[in-house]
Amino acid sequence: MKFLLTTRPVILRLCALLVAAWVLGAASLYLPPAAHALTTGAATRPTEVTVVDSAGILNSAEVQESVSKIEYPREISIVVLAAATGSREDRALNDYVRDQALGEHPEWRSTSNPDKFREGLLILAVDPVARINGAYMGEDLHLEGDSLTTVLDSAKPAFRENRWSDGMIDAARVAADVYADGAIGDGNLSADGVYTPRQKTFFEANHAVIVGGGAAAVVGGGAGTIIALVSRRRTSEATRLLREAEATYSDLSFRLGEMDVNANTLPESSAVAMQVRDDVRRFDTVYRQATQRVSELAGLRKNDKLPGKYLQEVRDLCTITEAAAGLEKRVDATNDILNQVPGWQNSWLDQCRDLVESADQVEALIGKSRATAASPTAQYLRSAAVELTQGVHNLPNLVERRQLAPDAALVQLRDLATKFQQAQNSHVGVMMEQVSRNAAGRERARSAMSGRTTWSYGGGYFGGYNYGGGVMTAGSQFTPTAALITGYTVASAAARQSSSGSGSSGGFSGGGSFSGSGGSSRF
């Protein structure tokens, strides 16, 4: 009894200290990022970022810019790879990356040990059809177990929503967190897009000890980490998109007067001008919708951030503001062209840029199917592409020489673009018939292609791809060749794929003695 009385104060003080430590540790986990110390080591951005997108699903410019602004604790080169492997096997992506290293991309292999990936190289990969993502690296960047899983899992929420670029960026940022032994998904993202991993606090680094068991560490550091990462990512994206929508809306508001002047100075007798006046009326409707939604979402900010639960709403707002901006740009360009405003040729080329890009990519589309490359539809498509390209460049010259009226030039452009679109549709139809020998395979291909060949630009909000200063009216459709290439790539892979369960793979099959580090899993 005497022993208990003399030791009780010590025991109580120890308990109090443990409770205080636990409370402080828990509190530190919920402090806002600004309250934590940032990584102070010799951080460096990637020496090289390469985007290899044979699946055609990435916004390469966005991925390139965002990943190049991530700070890592050591020199690193990053490859972001998207490919439809044509297989549903668990090892499909592993083997595809291996085959690329052994074939088209020998620069991915180590010079000192060709059976390994190059030192300082990190490859982040995804197969959108098989729904597998992977990470592969040089031996000096070796990841395995929980570390590899953390990187792979960080991309899956975005991948499940078919936000492929976002998923790749998430994985690259979390990889930096893992290599820096930082707080996962809780680094500092500056206003200009630079991502810097945050060092863990003492209590975060020793969380399992403080809370008294591995179970709490698993819950707090595993599922909790992923949930927190998803929540922060959605909030960050929602906040960024709202800022972009507000900037677009503000710019539109500033130029309203100019657009009204341009609309009112269009030639009365022009059939094209009549269609553009319809665009102005549609613009008024969309602008009112944008005004209301910008005000509503801006009022939902908390501490200057828009909660992630409003992410879909702000995406819808961006669609509306982009549609309004496209309409405004088209009205201005049409006025320039029809009234021969100095520099109107630049407006013409700007409105035709995507048409020219599509015509330039025709051979890439035709080359996707060797069986149909010499077919009559392929020859007709080539001819239509040449006519479209020539028309884009020759019609303005005829206008300048006063051999053709501007209104007539725009109508001829519309006819050339319509012919080109019809030629594309005809040839893609022939390609789809050859994608599989059986009806079931063709049906899987058509299903996979559905929804992957839609493209919005300018007036896409109204269901049409508009070009040539507004020649195409609402409801007219133009699918760029790039979208058709993506759709066919995914469709042909879907036709070949066989069903399989979900799983993960951490190695390579076949390929001789190649045994690079990394692995993959399904999402």
Image (cartoon, grey):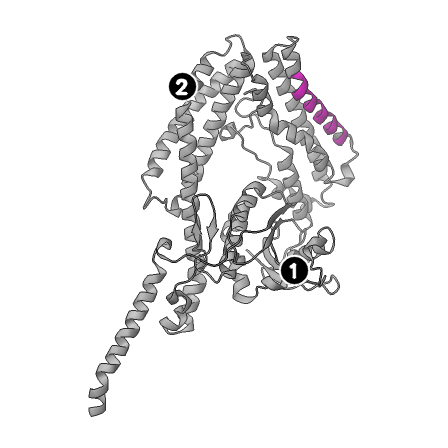
Q: Determine contact: label 1, label 2, CB under 8 Å.
A: no
Q: Nearer the viewer, residue 140 or 248?
A: 140
Q: Please state the horizontal and vertical placement of residue 77, each as a whole percent of the image.
A: 60, 53
From the viewer's perspective, tell me whether residue 409 is left or right of residue 1: right
Name the outermost residue toward the right: 374
Q: Secondary structure at mark 2?
A: helix
Q: What is the tally of numbered marks visible in this picture? A: 2
In magenta stretch: residue 321:
no
Residues drawn in magenta:
378-395
**Which quarter shows the C terminus?**
bottom right
**Which quarter shows the N terminus?**
bottom left
Q: Secondary structure at mark 1?
A: loop
From the viewer's perspective, tell me whether residue 515 is left or right of residue 318: right
**Residue, disc 2:** 257
**Residue, disc 1:** 91
Spatial separation of the CA atoms under disc 1 and disc 2: 59 Å
Q: Nearer the viewer, residue 77 or 398?
A: 77
Name the outermost residue toward the bottom: 2
